[in-house]
Image (cartoon, rainbow, N blue to C red):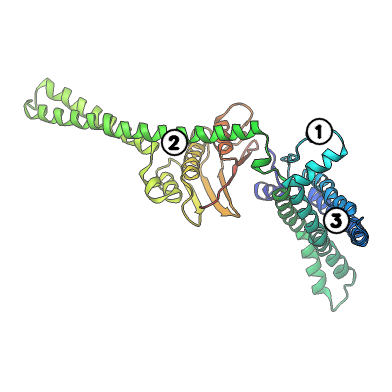
Amino acid sequence: MRPATAWQAMAQRPAGFLTSSWPWRSLAYLAGGVIVGAIAVLVFTAGLATGIVLLVVLLGIAPLVGLVLGSTVVASVERRRLRLVDLDPVPDPHRTPEAPGFKAWVATRLKEQATWRELTFTLISAAALWWLDLLVLGFSFGVPAVTISSVDGDTWPWAVFGSVVLLASPYTLTSWAGARAAMARTFLAPRDQELGEELREVRATQSRLLDSFDAERIRIERDLHDGAQQRLVSLGMTLGMLRLDTPEDSPQSELLTQAETQLMTAQQELRALIRGLNPPVLADHGLVAAIEDYAGRFPIPVTVDLRLPRRLPRKIETTMYFLINEALTNIAKHSGAGTAAVHGRYHSDLLILDITDDGHGGVDTEAGSGVTGLADRVAALEGRMRVSSPAGGPTLLHVEVPCRFA
């Protein structure tokens, strides 16, 4: 699957990034930002000046309200522009007015929190963002143009510097475009309270199911530990007592040996099952230690690079453990990989995981594969998951989950 954002494009396709469309999309996004920002500055300056002047005679409220409502237009344009560097569409957070007519529309918009967030974004865009867009474009292309065109015998180091800046410009543009798009999504995406009642109920149901599965998993683990495992221990003691009364060279002794071997195998399998249902290392030491422990027992080498500021909330920690567990199991079963890696960071209230392997790739996310179950786990936490798996490999599973510490 193709990358969903500009940042993912740089991370997932380091070899083919320069020949992809992402640098050009980033260039178009930033150039458009300069144009939209400059127009917004002119319109808002004129509207604000007119409103202040007319406010003296109590007629300025209309231009000022117009500026607030105009921000919704800027936000609408920005949502469309975001598709250049973020393929996931940003839903419109505004609700339909309860009554027809312009007056009802204005009243509805002025009462919505989304409108005031859009006004904030528009002011930030007009005051700073488009200037930063222009600065990045100027640095990426203006500096090389000046230094290279003015080269002579004494200034050739500047020409070298300009050439380096020009060669790095695809990464410079895409990095800033990705950061700008992430900030814009923060302001322009709908909040939970602005989502429809039906969608909120779906998310609440997903959360309840996740809690229910977690509680059921713990119950099963406890029942197996206190029930089946104890019975197997008791059976082992009975076989041991029977061994004392059985001659070593009798046929019964050989049958007892077979029974003890099968009992030992059953106990090992049951312990592995219990440990998989509720790993003690996860409960006692957290996600990082649990994944390192699991990777140490994995049939292929797994590099673990998880750096978290503290233990995650229980629901996220448990879900991420079983997600990584299932993803690695899929790698061992289906990818033909020789190595795998788990990379994780926490940044700005977001847990970001990358699970990679050097297998043959070709994962079809639409064919109902094991990836579907992973996506369901992520969706239950209101996160996003993307898969890059070209034929011939490598495969990258990218997960982003909102995570806030209490």
Mark number displayed over residue 217: none
How far apart, in angstroms, are the residues tagged by discs 2 and 1? 45 Å
Q: Nearer the viewer, residue 138 or 100?
A: 100
For residue 113, side relative to residue 67 (left or right): left
Mark number displayed over residue 37: 3
Image coords of residue 199 (percent x, y): 64, 33
Image coords of residue 400 (percent x, y): 60, 45
Q: Nearer the viewer, residue 71 or 372?
A: 71
Residue matched to label 2: 214
As helix, strand or loop, the secondary structure at mark 1 comes to: loop
Residue at the image point whose x is 70% and y is 39% from the top = 2
Q: Earlier in the sequence, mark 3 or mark 2?
A: 3
- Residue 230 visible: yes
Using the rendered view, name the quadrant where residue 102 is placed.
top right
Q: Earlier in the sequence, mark 1 or mark 3?
A: 3
Residue at the image point whose x is 57% and y is 46% from the top = 354
Residue at the image point whose x is 49% and y is 36% from the top = 326
Image coords of residue 374 (percent x, y): 55, 35
For residue 339, side relative to residue 264 (left or right): right
Disc 2 and disc 1 in contact, CB within 8 angstroms: no
How far apart, in angstroms, are the residues tagged by discs 1 and 3? 33 Å
Say what amino acid the circle numbered 3 marks.
Gly
Say what amino acid the circle numbered 1 marks.
Ala
Residue matched to label 1: 99
As helix, strand or loop, the secondary structure at mark 3 comes to: helix
Image coords of residue 66 (percent x, y): 87, 50
Q: Residues within 10 Å of mark 3 (few under 14, many from 20)?
A: many
Say what amino acid the circle numbered 2 marks.
Asp
